[in-house]
Amino acid sequence: MTPRPDPLAPVRARLDAALAAGVLPPDARAEAQALVARMDVPVRVVLMGPPRGGRSAVLNLLAGARVVPDGLRLPTLRLVAGSRRMARLTQADGRVETLSDPDPETLAARGAVFVEMTADLPALGRISLLEVVAGPDPEAQARAAAWAARRADIAIWCSRAFDAGEARVWRGLPAALRGHGILLRTHADDLGGPEARAVAIRALGEAAGADFPHVLAIDTPEALAARDTDGPGGIDRARLRASGGQTLIATVLRQLDDGRQALADRADVLLCRHGLEAIAPVSAPSPAPAAPPAATRRAFEEAVERLARAGRDMTQGAATPTEVMRRSVAELVWLDGHLDAVPGTDPLLAAARDAATRAADMAQLMQVENRDSAAVEAVSLMIQLRHTLTRDLRMVA
Protein backbone atom coordinates (compact mmCIF):
# COMPACT_ATOMS: atom_id res chain seq x y z
CA MET A 1 0.00 0.00 0.00
CA THR A 2 1.56 3.28 -1.16
CA PRO A 3 2.03 5.99 1.50
CA ARG A 4 -0.25 9.02 1.10
CA PRO A 5 -0.30 12.51 2.62
CA ASP A 6 -1.68 12.30 6.15
CA PRO A 7 -4.77 14.50 6.71
CA LEU A 8 -3.91 14.57 10.41
CA ALA A 9 -0.60 16.40 10.06
CA PRO A 10 -1.91 20.02 10.29
CA VAL A 11 -4.33 19.44 13.17
CA ARG A 12 -1.81 17.26 14.97
CA ALA A 13 0.60 20.20 14.91
CA ARG A 14 -2.09 22.46 16.40
CA LEU A 15 -2.89 19.91 19.11
CA ASP A 16 0.79 19.60 19.99
CA ALA A 17 1.10 23.39 20.16
CA ALA A 18 -1.98 23.71 22.38
CA LEU A 19 -0.70 21.03 24.74
CA ALA A 20 2.78 22.56 24.87
CA ALA A 21 1.36 26.02 25.58
CA GLY A 22 -0.86 24.74 28.39
CA VAL A 23 -3.90 26.66 27.11
CA LEU A 24 -6.40 23.80 27.48
CA PRO A 25 -8.32 23.12 30.72
CA PRO A 26 -7.67 19.73 32.38
CA ASP A 27 -10.60 17.82 30.83
CA ALA A 28 -9.86 19.14 27.34
CA ARG A 29 -6.15 18.45 27.83
CA ALA A 30 -6.93 14.81 28.64
CA GLU A 31 -9.13 14.56 25.55
CA ALA A 32 -6.40 16.12 23.40
CA GLN A 33 -3.79 13.72 24.75
CA ALA A 34 -6.09 10.78 23.99
CA LEU A 35 -6.57 12.05 20.43
CA VAL A 36 -2.82 12.43 19.94
CA ALA A 37 -2.27 8.89 21.21
CA ARG A 38 -4.91 7.57 18.78
CA MET A 39 -3.31 9.47 15.89
CA ASP A 40 -0.02 7.69 16.56
CA VAL A 41 -1.56 4.21 16.18
CA PRO A 42 -1.88 2.70 12.68
CA VAL A 43 -5.43 1.93 11.59
CA ARG A 44 -6.36 -1.62 12.61
CA VAL A 45 -7.64 -3.81 9.76
CA VAL A 46 -9.14 -7.20 10.63
CA LEU A 47 -9.66 -10.05 8.15
CA MET A 48 -12.57 -12.31 9.06
CA GLY A 49 -14.56 -15.06 7.40
CA PRO A 50 -15.04 -18.83 7.21
CA PRO A 51 -12.22 -21.36 6.72
CA ARG A 52 -10.73 -21.41 3.21
CA GLY A 53 -12.08 -17.93 2.60
CA GLY A 54 -8.73 -16.64 1.35
CA ARG A 55 -7.88 -14.39 4.31
CA SER A 56 -4.13 -15.14 4.34
CA ALA A 57 -3.73 -14.24 0.68
CA VAL A 58 -5.54 -10.94 1.29
CA LEU A 59 -3.26 -10.27 4.26
CA ASN A 60 -0.24 -10.83 1.98
CA LEU A 61 -1.66 -8.45 -0.62
CA LEU A 62 -2.35 -5.63 1.86
CA ALA A 63 1.00 -6.15 3.61
CA GLY A 64 2.84 -6.03 0.29
CA ALA A 65 4.79 -9.23 1.03
CA ARG A 66 4.13 -12.98 1.20
CA VAL A 67 4.02 -13.19 4.98
CA VAL A 68 1.98 -16.42 5.00
CA PRO A 69 3.00 -18.95 2.30
CA ASP A 70 0.32 -20.64 0.20
CA GLY A 71 -1.20 -23.67 1.87
CA LEU A 72 0.26 -22.97 5.33
CA ARG A 73 -2.22 -22.70 8.20
CA LEU A 74 -1.23 -20.34 11.00
CA PRO A 75 -3.27 -19.46 14.08
CA THR A 76 -4.84 -16.04 14.49
CA LEU A 77 -2.11 -13.64 13.39
CA ARG A 78 -1.54 -9.97 14.11
CA LEU A 79 1.00 -8.23 11.88
CA VAL A 80 2.43 -4.91 13.04
CA ALA A 81 5.33 -2.62 12.19
CA GLY A 82 8.75 -3.34 13.63
CA SER A 83 12.37 -2.64 12.78
CA ARG A 84 13.04 -6.37 12.46
CA ARG A 85 11.11 -9.58 12.09
CA MET A 86 10.06 -11.10 15.41
CA ALA A 87 7.14 -13.18 16.65
CA ARG A 88 5.45 -13.46 20.02
CA LEU A 89 3.53 -16.73 20.38
CA THR A 90 0.79 -17.30 22.95
CA GLN A 91 -0.12 -20.90 23.83
CA ALA A 92 -3.53 -22.14 25.00
CA ASP A 93 -2.28 -22.29 28.61
CA GLY A 94 -1.13 -18.67 28.49
CA ARG A 95 2.59 -19.33 28.06
CA VAL A 96 4.32 -16.78 25.84
CA GLU A 97 7.36 -17.43 23.66
CA THR A 98 9.34 -14.90 21.63
CA LEU A 99 11.19 -15.94 18.47
CA SER A 100 13.66 -13.84 16.50
CA ASP A 101 13.37 -13.92 12.69
CA PRO A 102 11.13 -17.02 12.64
CA ASP A 103 10.14 -18.79 9.44
CA PRO A 104 6.40 -19.41 8.90
CA GLU A 105 6.80 -23.20 9.10
CA THR A 106 8.24 -22.89 12.61
CA LEU A 107 5.34 -20.69 13.66
CA ALA A 108 2.83 -23.21 12.32
CA ALA A 109 4.55 -26.11 14.11
CA ARG A 110 4.53 -24.47 17.57
CA GLY A 111 0.83 -25.05 18.17
CA ALA A 112 0.15 -21.51 19.40
CA VAL A 113 -3.33 -20.03 19.52
CA PHE A 114 -2.19 -16.48 18.73
CA VAL A 115 0.86 -14.99 17.02
CA GLU A 116 1.88 -11.33 16.97
CA MET A 117 4.53 -10.70 14.34
CA THR A 118 6.55 -7.57 13.63
CA ALA A 119 7.94 -6.82 10.20
CA ASP A 120 9.66 -3.91 8.49
CA LEU A 121 7.15 -3.32 5.70
CA PRO A 122 6.10 0.12 4.35
CA ALA A 123 2.37 -0.70 4.49
CA LEU A 124 2.56 -1.30 8.24
CA GLY A 125 3.33 2.35 8.80
CA ARG A 126 -0.34 3.04 8.12
CA ILE A 127 -2.12 -0.17 9.08
CA SER A 128 -1.86 -3.23 11.27
CA LEU A 129 -3.40 -6.49 10.07
CA LEU A 130 -5.24 -9.09 12.13
CA GLU A 131 -6.25 -12.38 10.50
CA VAL A 132 -8.86 -14.19 12.59
CA VAL A 133 -8.73 -17.99 12.40
CA ALA A 134 -11.67 -20.08 13.66
CA GLY A 135 -13.19 -23.41 12.79
CA PRO A 136 -16.36 -23.92 10.74
CA ASP A 137 -18.65 -23.95 13.79
CA PRO A 138 -20.76 -20.74 13.72
CA GLU A 139 -20.46 -20.28 17.49
CA ALA A 140 -16.66 -20.46 17.31
CA GLN A 141 -16.67 -17.96 14.44
CA ALA A 142 -18.96 -15.63 16.38
CA ARG A 143 -16.72 -15.72 19.47
CA ALA A 144 -13.60 -15.09 17.38
CA ALA A 145 -15.25 -12.24 15.48
CA ALA A 146 -16.47 -10.60 18.70
CA TRP A 147 -12.95 -10.82 20.15
CA ALA A 148 -11.44 -9.27 17.00
CA ALA A 149 -14.05 -6.51 16.79
CA ARG A 150 -12.65 -4.93 19.96
CA ARG A 151 -9.29 -4.67 18.20
CA ALA A 152 -10.36 -3.32 14.81
CA ASP A 153 -11.23 -0.13 12.96
CA ILE A 154 -11.94 -1.68 9.54
CA ALA A 155 -13.30 -5.20 8.92
CA ILE A 156 -12.92 -7.22 5.70
CA TRP A 157 -15.10 -10.32 5.51
CA CYS A 158 -13.46 -12.79 3.11
CA SER A 159 -15.83 -15.38 1.68
CA ARG A 160 -16.85 -17.36 -1.38
CA ALA A 161 -20.59 -16.99 -0.74
CA PHE A 162 -21.59 -15.05 2.42
CA ASP A 163 -24.30 -17.47 3.44
CA ALA A 164 -26.94 -17.10 6.17
CA GLY A 165 -24.61 -18.37 8.92
CA GLU A 166 -21.93 -15.84 7.98
CA ALA A 167 -24.55 -13.09 7.89
CA ARG A 168 -25.59 -13.91 11.47
CA VAL A 169 -22.00 -13.68 12.67
CA TRP A 170 -21.47 -10.39 10.83
CA ARG A 171 -24.69 -8.82 12.13
CA GLY A 172 -23.62 -9.64 15.68
CA LEU A 173 -20.67 -7.25 15.41
CA PRO A 174 -20.83 -3.62 16.64
CA ALA A 175 -22.58 -1.27 14.24
CA ALA A 176 -19.61 1.12 14.23
CA LEU A 177 -17.34 -1.61 12.85
CA ARG A 178 -19.93 -2.86 10.35
CA GLY A 179 -20.12 0.70 9.08
CA HIS A 180 -16.49 0.30 8.02
CA GLY A 181 -16.94 -3.17 6.55
CA ILE A 182 -15.97 -4.66 3.21
CA LEU A 183 -17.49 -7.88 1.88
CA LEU A 184 -14.79 -9.42 -0.29
CA ARG A 185 -15.84 -12.24 -2.60
CA THR A 186 -12.55 -14.13 -2.87
CA HIS A 187 -11.63 -16.72 -5.50
CA ALA A 188 -13.33 -14.53 -8.10
CA ASP A 189 -11.57 -16.55 -10.81
CA ASP A 190 -14.23 -19.26 -10.38
CA LEU A 191 -16.97 -16.82 -11.39
CA GLY A 192 -15.98 -16.81 -15.06
CA GLY A 193 -15.07 -13.88 -17.29
CA PRO A 194 -15.52 -10.17 -16.54
CA GLU A 195 -19.19 -10.07 -17.54
CA ALA A 196 -20.13 -13.15 -15.49
CA ARG A 197 -18.11 -11.79 -12.57
CA ALA A 198 -19.96 -8.47 -12.73
CA VAL A 199 -23.34 -10.24 -12.72
CA ALA A 200 -22.34 -12.40 -9.74
CA ILE A 201 -21.07 -9.45 -7.71
CA ARG A 202 -24.18 -7.42 -8.52
CA ALA A 203 -26.31 -10.28 -7.19
CA LEU A 204 -24.14 -10.56 -4.07
CA GLY A 205 -24.40 -6.83 -3.54
CA GLU A 206 -28.19 -6.97 -3.77
CA ALA A 207 -28.28 -9.83 -1.26
CA ALA A 208 -25.73 -8.50 1.23
CA GLY A 209 -25.25 -4.86 0.33
CA ALA A 210 -27.42 -3.63 3.20
CA ASP A 211 -24.90 -5.16 5.61
CA PHE A 212 -21.77 -3.68 3.97
CA PRO A 213 -20.77 -0.26 2.63
CA HIS A 214 -18.61 -2.05 0.04
CA VAL A 215 -19.03 -5.36 -1.82
CA LEU A 216 -15.99 -6.31 -3.93
CA ALA A 217 -14.52 -9.32 -5.71
CA ILE A 218 -10.89 -10.36 -6.06
CA ASP A 219 -8.81 -13.01 -7.74
CA THR A 220 -6.19 -12.89 -4.99
CA PRO A 221 -3.57 -15.21 -6.55
CA GLU A 222 -3.67 -13.07 -9.69
CA ALA A 223 -3.42 -9.87 -7.61
CA LEU A 224 -0.41 -11.24 -5.74
CA ALA A 225 1.22 -12.28 -8.99
CA ALA A 226 0.69 -8.75 -10.31
CA ARG A 227 2.68 -7.41 -7.35
CA ASP A 228 5.53 -9.87 -7.89
CA THR A 229 6.44 -8.83 -11.43
CA ASP A 230 9.77 -7.41 -12.51
CA GLY A 231 8.21 -4.38 -14.16
CA PRO A 232 8.55 -0.74 -13.04
CA GLY A 233 7.97 -0.61 -9.30
CA GLY A 234 7.54 -4.38 -9.22
CA ILE A 235 3.81 -4.10 -10.04
CA ASP A 236 1.86 -4.93 -13.19
CA ARG A 237 -0.84 -2.33 -12.67
CA ALA A 238 -3.11 -3.46 -15.47
CA ARG A 239 -3.06 -6.99 -14.10
CA LEU A 240 -3.65 -5.71 -10.56
CA ARG A 241 -6.70 -3.76 -11.74
CA ALA A 242 -8.10 -6.72 -13.67
CA SER A 243 -7.75 -8.97 -10.62
CA GLY A 244 -9.73 -6.64 -8.37
CA GLY A 245 -6.67 -6.04 -6.20
CA GLN A 246 -6.38 -2.36 -7.08
CA THR A 247 -10.03 -1.74 -6.17
CA LEU A 248 -9.57 -3.43 -2.80
CA ILE A 249 -6.43 -1.45 -2.01
CA ALA A 250 -8.07 1.82 -3.08
CA THR A 251 -11.15 1.07 -0.96
CA VAL A 252 -9.03 0.35 2.11
CA LEU A 253 -7.06 3.55 1.53
CA ARG A 254 -10.28 5.56 1.33
CA GLN A 255 -11.46 3.98 4.57
CA LEU A 256 -8.12 4.84 6.18
CA ASP A 257 -8.35 8.44 5.03
CA ASP A 258 -11.97 8.71 6.22
CA GLY A 259 -10.96 7.42 9.65
CA ARG A 260 -8.02 9.78 9.89
CA GLN A 261 -10.20 12.68 8.75
CA ALA A 262 -12.74 11.81 11.45
CA LEU A 263 -9.97 12.08 14.04
CA ALA A 264 -8.92 15.42 12.54
CA ASP A 265 -12.51 16.66 12.73
CA ARG A 266 -12.78 15.66 16.39
CA ALA A 267 -9.56 17.54 17.10
CA ASP A 268 -10.84 20.57 15.20
CA VAL A 269 -14.03 20.58 17.28
CA LEU A 270 -12.03 20.33 20.51
CA LEU A 271 -9.75 23.24 19.59
CA CYS A 272 -12.64 25.31 18.24
CA ARG A 273 -14.57 24.78 21.47
CA HIS A 274 -11.76 26.50 23.35
CA GLY A 275 -11.34 29.43 20.99
CA LEU A 276 -8.26 28.20 19.16
CA GLU A 277 -9.69 28.73 15.66
CA ALA A 278 -9.11 25.22 14.39
CA ILE A 279 -11.73 25.46 11.66
CA ALA A 280 -10.09 28.33 9.78
CA PRO A 281 -6.69 29.12 11.27
CA VAL A 282 -5.48 32.64 10.72
CA SER A 283 -2.57 32.94 8.34
CA ALA A 284 -0.14 35.80 8.48
CA PRO A 285 -1.89 38.65 6.65
CA SER A 286 -0.39 39.93 3.45
CA PRO A 287 1.00 43.48 3.53
CA ALA A 288 -1.96 44.87 1.60
CA PRO A 289 -4.93 42.52 1.44
CA ALA A 290 -7.14 43.04 -1.55
CA ALA A 291 -10.75 43.98 -0.95
CA PRO A 292 -13.13 41.15 -1.81
CA PRO A 293 -15.73 41.61 -4.53
CA ALA A 294 -18.97 43.26 -3.47
CA ALA A 295 -20.85 39.95 -3.76
CA THR A 296 -18.50 38.30 -1.25
CA ARG A 297 -18.83 41.19 1.20
CA ARG A 298 -22.64 41.16 0.99
CA ALA A 299 -22.71 37.38 1.47
CA PHE A 300 -20.44 37.59 4.53
CA GLU A 301 -22.50 40.41 6.05
CA GLU A 302 -25.75 38.46 5.54
CA ALA A 303 -24.18 35.33 7.02
CA VAL A 304 -22.83 37.16 10.09
CA GLU A 305 -26.24 38.75 10.74
CA ARG A 306 -28.09 35.44 10.37
CA LEU A 307 -25.67 33.44 12.54
CA ALA A 308 -25.77 36.12 15.24
CA ARG A 309 -29.58 36.03 15.21
CA ALA A 310 -29.57 32.24 15.46
CA GLY A 311 -27.14 32.41 18.37
CA ARG A 312 -29.38 34.85 20.23
CA ASP A 313 -32.44 32.67 19.61
CA MET A 314 -30.73 29.59 21.03
CA THR A 315 -29.26 31.29 24.09
CA GLN A 316 -32.30 33.38 25.07
CA GLY A 317 -34.98 30.72 24.63
CA ALA A 318 -35.62 27.49 26.52
CA ALA A 319 -34.62 25.18 23.69
CA THR A 320 -33.74 21.57 24.46
CA PRO A 321 -30.34 20.15 23.42
CA THR A 322 -32.06 18.31 20.58
CA GLU A 323 -33.62 21.56 19.32
CA VAL A 324 -30.29 23.38 19.65
CA MET A 325 -28.57 20.61 17.71
CA ARG A 326 -31.20 20.69 14.97
CA ARG A 327 -31.04 24.49 14.65
CA SER A 328 -27.23 24.52 14.58
CA VAL A 329 -27.13 21.92 11.83
CA ALA A 330 -29.77 23.81 9.83
CA GLU A 331 -27.83 27.09 10.08
CA LEU A 332 -24.52 25.49 9.10
CA VAL A 333 -26.09 23.69 6.15
CA TRP A 334 -27.68 27.00 5.11
CA LEU A 335 -24.31 28.75 5.34
CA ASP A 336 -22.66 26.07 3.22
CA GLY A 337 -25.25 26.51 0.46
CA HIS A 338 -25.33 30.30 0.85
CA LEU A 339 -21.58 30.71 0.28
CA ASP A 340 -21.54 28.13 -2.50
CA ALA A 341 -24.09 30.20 -4.42
CA VAL A 342 -21.95 33.37 -4.32
CA PRO A 343 -20.23 34.02 -7.67
CA GLY A 344 -16.46 34.35 -7.63
CA THR A 345 -13.32 32.54 -6.58
CA ASP A 346 -11.50 35.14 -4.46
CA PRO A 347 -9.32 33.66 -1.67
CA LEU A 348 -11.50 34.83 1.24
CA LEU A 349 -14.62 33.33 -0.33
CA ALA A 350 -12.82 30.05 -1.15
CA ALA A 351 -11.54 29.73 2.43
CA ALA A 352 -14.98 30.49 3.87
CA ARG A 353 -16.59 27.92 1.60
CA ASP A 354 -14.14 25.25 2.74
CA ALA A 355 -14.69 26.12 6.41
CA ALA A 356 -18.48 26.12 6.04
CA THR A 357 -18.52 22.77 4.24
CA ARG A 358 -16.35 21.17 6.88
CA ALA A 359 -18.41 22.64 9.71
CA ALA A 360 -21.69 21.46 8.16
CA ASP A 361 -20.29 17.96 7.68
CA MET A 362 -18.95 17.86 11.23
CA ALA A 363 -22.23 19.08 12.73
CA GLN A 364 -24.25 16.48 10.84
CA LEU A 365 -21.81 13.80 11.99
CA MET A 366 -22.19 14.95 15.60
CA GLN A 367 -25.98 14.90 15.22
CA VAL A 368 -25.82 11.26 14.10
CA GLU A 369 -23.47 10.34 16.96
CA ASN A 370 -25.92 11.96 19.43
CA ARG A 371 -23.33 12.50 22.16
CA ASP A 372 -24.29 14.52 25.26
CA SER A 373 -21.89 17.33 24.32
CA ALA A 374 -22.86 17.42 20.62
CA ALA A 375 -25.21 20.41 20.88
CA VAL A 376 -22.58 22.55 22.63
CA GLU A 377 -19.96 21.57 20.08
CA ALA A 378 -22.28 22.40 17.17
CA VAL A 379 -23.04 25.82 18.61
CA SER A 380 -19.29 26.35 19.05
CA LEU A 381 -18.77 25.60 15.37
CA MET A 382 -21.42 28.15 14.41
CA ILE A 383 -19.99 30.84 16.69
CA GLN A 384 -16.48 30.20 15.45
CA LEU A 385 -17.56 30.59 11.84
CA ARG A 386 -19.34 33.84 12.65
CA HIS A 387 -16.18 35.17 14.30
CA THR A 388 -14.10 34.11 11.31
CA LEU A 389 -16.41 35.84 8.84
CA THR A 390 -16.48 38.99 11.01
CA ARG A 391 -12.67 38.99 11.23
CA ASP A 392 -12.35 38.63 7.45
CA LEU A 393 -14.66 41.58 6.90
CA ARG A 394 -12.58 43.74 9.28
CA MET A 395 -9.34 42.75 7.58
CA VAL A 396 -10.43 44.35 4.33
CA ALA A 397 -12.49 47.20 5.75
Image (spheres, rainbow, N blue to C red):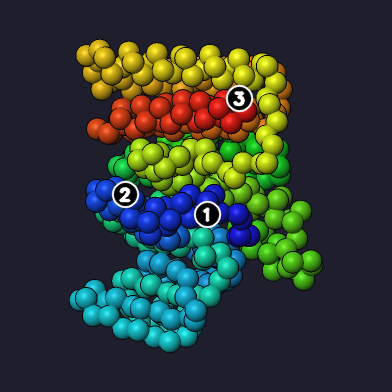
Instruction: Identify which amino acid the numbered label 2 is placed on.
Output: Leu
Residue at (36, 27) in percent of width and height: 379
Looking at the rendered structure, which numbered label has been put on residue 9? 1
Seen in the picture, residue 216 relative to 333 is either above or below; the reply is below
With 123 as the anchor, is 305 left or right in this view? left
Disc 3/disc 2 C-alpha distance (Å): 33 Å
Going from N to C along the chain, the mark reached first, 1 or 2, is 1
With 330 as the anchor, is 252 left or right in this view? right
Q: Foreground: 286 or 338?
A: 286
Question: CB under 8 Å between callouts 1 and 2?
Answer: no
Tell me the crowding category of disc 1: few under 14, some 14 to 19, or many 20 or more residues within 10 angstroms, Cα based. few
Q: Check disc 3 and report its element: helix, strand or loop.
A: loop
Question: CB under 8 Å between callouts 3 and 2?
Answer: no
Task: Give the residue pinned by disc 3.
Answer: 397
Tell me the crowding category of disc 2: few under 14, some 14 to 19, or many 20 or more residues within 10 angstroms, Cα based. many
Seen in the picture, residue 205 relative to 135 is either above or below; the reply is above
Going from N to C along the chain, the mark reached first, 3 or 2, is 2
Going from N to C along the chain, the mark reached first, 3 or 1, is 1
Instruction: Identify which amino acid the numbered label 1 is placed on.
Output: Ala
Task: Give the residue pinned by disc 2.
Answer: 24
Q: Check disc 2 and report its element: helix, strand or loop.
A: loop
Query: Which callout, 3 or 1, points to the residue nearer the camera?
Result: 3
With 319 as the anchor, is 239 left or right in this view? right
> Which percent across, then down, holds residue 272?
40, 39
Q: Foreground: 231 or 293?
A: 293
| Residue 325 seen by the camera | yes
> Which percent across, then down, holds residue 13?
48, 55
Q: Where's the N terminus, which quadrant?
A: bottom right
